[in-house]
């Protein structure tokens, strides 16, 4: 029992340190005047039944639900935390003393901090929203996509390839129809993978592939690495909820595929970390070539010529609002073993996205494909 209590206390300590680190990171994005007028609060974890978080202006305390931090992914925790920081900002910087809790000054604070004003009360955390599958009539096309991805598990190579190509065509059609309808859309942000102190060339290649083919905007942002007790970075996906579902699924599927293929490839070779990166990059380069080839084939098909990839102006607006100042960089890798890279490319060209499991280790979820 003593060891269990020590483990719980250490986990609480790490989580509270993470909340404090995320608070400092959020405040760092403010201008100097804004930063001077807000001080670090007390952080606590509490058993809450009707809310995910709470800002107590008398105690100067931000409390988060213990169930939230233990049962949900860190991006869900971070979203609620930003909401509570907005309450603190509204009280201590904007002096929102004589208005309702979610009044105009709170809304202004959310805009400044890029916080979600809805992330409280009975709000469904982002990881649940992404993992759940809506059953409304408007999702008929998405159900077709999932069925095609399930069909892509077929041992018949031709059938599997055709199913994946058709699924990608339907994903494009869904987004073309979405833009044509010109309705207000619900955008959100979620992590792909887990925060880490370091990322490899393969991580950046996978991020680029998801950005280029799955109708989301990606960016590397600062986030707390719970296992290390430090701030690191994580890939964030931004887009319409349905596209986040697809992009998250593909990200996890490809990551797991690479891991499985590496175990098999390296079974009797004894290759090290850098060759694993080469192999992973090869798979991703091969898969990208395959997707590009499929796009070229569609251009030759008269039935597909009307489908043209276009940017979603509302998504661009959402992304620029969240990240008005973006720094781009190029990462140069170590010398590659082209033989290992080419072996990976051959495998990448055979990769077929198919159905997966509903849950994976480490928090975060995969879509269920019937």
Image (cartoon, grey):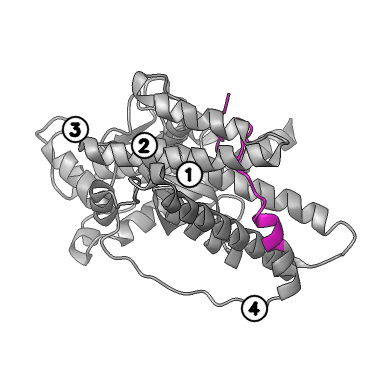
Mark nearest the camera among 2 and 3 is 2
Residue 247 circle label: 1
Name, please, the residue furthest toward the bottom: 335
Q: Which residue is mark 3?
A: 102
Distance, label 4 to label 2, CA atoms, is: 40 Å
Mark nearest the camera among 3 and 4 is 4
Name, please, the residue furthest toward the right: 268
Q: Residues within 10 Å of mark 2 (few under 14, many from 20)?
A: some
Distance, label 1 to label 4, CA atoms, is: 29 Å
- Looking at the rendered structure, the secondary structure element under dot 3 is loop
Q: Is residue 66 visible?
A: no
Q: Residues within 10 Å of mark 1 (few under 14, many from 20)?
A: many
Q: Which residue is mark 2?
A: 174
Say whether residue 346 is magenta. Answer: yes
> In this picture, which residue range is highlighted in magenta?
344-370
Q: Residues within 10 Å of mark 4 (few under 14, many from 20)?
A: few
Distance, label 1 to label 3, CA atoms, is: 32 Å
């Amino acid at each position: 029992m003593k060891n269990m209590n020590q483990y719980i206390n250490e986990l609480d300590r790490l989580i509270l340190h993470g909340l404090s680190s995320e608070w400092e990171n959020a405040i760092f994005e403010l201008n100097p005047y804004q930063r001077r007028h807000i001080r670090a609060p007390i952080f606590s974890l509490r058993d809450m039944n009707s809310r995910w978080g709470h800002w107590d202006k008398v105690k100067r305390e931000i409390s988060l639900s213990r169930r939230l931090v233990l049962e949900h992914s860190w991006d869900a925790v971070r979203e609620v935390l930003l909401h509570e920081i907005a309450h603190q900002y509204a009280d201590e910087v904007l002096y929102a003393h004589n208005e309702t809790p979610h009044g105009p000054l709170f809304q202004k604070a959310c805009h400044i901090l890029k916080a979600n004003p809805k992330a409280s009360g009975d709000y469904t955390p982002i990881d649940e929203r992404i993992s759940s599958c809506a059953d409304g009539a408007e999702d008929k096309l998405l159900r077709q996509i999932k069925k095609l991805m399930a069909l892509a598990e077929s041992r018949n190579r031709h059938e599997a390839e055709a199913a994946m190509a058709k699924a990608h065509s339907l994903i494009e059609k869904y987004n073309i129809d979405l833009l044509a309808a010109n309705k207000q859309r619900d955008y959100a942000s979620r992590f792909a993978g887990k925060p880490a102190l370091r990322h490899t060339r393969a991580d950046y290649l996978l991020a680029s592939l998801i950005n280029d083919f799955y109708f989301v905007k990606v960016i590397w942002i600062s986030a707390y690495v719970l296992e290390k007790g430090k701030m690191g970075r994580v890939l964030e996906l931004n887009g319409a909820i349905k596209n986040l579902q697809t992009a998250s699924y593909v990200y996890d599927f490809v990551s797991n595929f690479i891991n499985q293929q590496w175990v098999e490839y390296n079974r009797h070779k004894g290759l090290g970390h850098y060759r694993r990166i080469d192999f992973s990059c090869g798979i991703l380069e091969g898969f990208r070539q395959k997707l590009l080839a499929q796009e070229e084939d569609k251009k030759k098909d008269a039935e597909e010529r009307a489908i043209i990839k276009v940017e979603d102006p509302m998504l661009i607006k959402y992304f620029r609002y969240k990240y008005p100042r973006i720094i781009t960089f190029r990462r140069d890798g170590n010398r590659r073993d082209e033989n290992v890279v080419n072996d990976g490319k051959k495998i990448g060209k055979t990769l077929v996205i198919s159905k997966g499991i509903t849950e994976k280790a480490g928090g975060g979820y995969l879509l269920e494909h019937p």
